[in-house]
Image (cartoon, grey):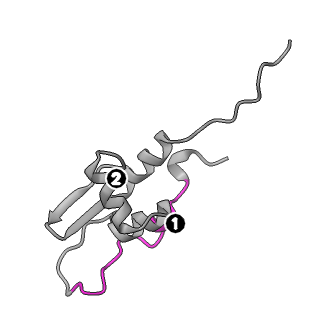
Amino acid sequence: MKSDAEVPLPACQAGVQRPAAHTGGPMIPGAIPEEAVAALFGFTVKTLREKRRKGDGPPYIRLSRSTTIYLADDVRAYLTSRRVGISLGKQEG
């Protein structure tokens, strides 16, 4: 069985994602654009931004007023922290 660290996030499998408007220059390895993170959680970008404003969600990096990215490791850690275990109830023994 794979450990949590070995299970890739679908949004991260492609590696560094380049926005369509990207014209070159260095990209941050493991960076995920906010659109991909919103899709991963099943949110709109507007909902993700509202959660961010309220202090919820994974840590993020604001590169400029209009560009926010997330690091894959931070998203993975956030998802792991939100995991809910299955309770089988009281076992008799």
Instruction: Tell me the amino acid under the disc marked 1.
Output: Pro
x and y percentages locating residue 24 in the rendered image: 20, 84
Left or right of 65? Residue 27 is right
Q: Residue 32 carries which label?
A: none
Point out the residue furthest to the left here. Answer: 64
Which residue is found at the position 71% from the left and 30% from the top? 87
x and y percentages locating residue 91 in the rendered image: 81, 19
Q: Does the magenta stretch include residue 68?
A: no
x and y percentages locating residue 41 in the rendered image: 48, 60
| Depth check, front residue: 40 or 42 | 42
Which mark lies nearer to you, 1 or 2?
A: 2
Say what secondary structure mark 2 lies in.
helix
Q: What stretch is highlighted in magenta?
A: 7-22
x and y percentages locating residue 58 in the rendered image: 35, 49
Which residue is found at the position 22% from the left and 57% from the top? 61
Q: Does the magenta stretch include residue 19?
A: yes
- The quadrant in which residue 14 appears is bottom left
Give the Cα separation between the discs numbered 1 and 2. Answer: 21 Å
Residue occupied by mark 2: 51
Residue occupied by mark 1: 10
In terms of sequence position, does the residue under pointer 1 or pointer 2 come before the other? 1
Left or right of 75? Residue 50 is left
Say what secondary structure mark 1 lies in.
helix
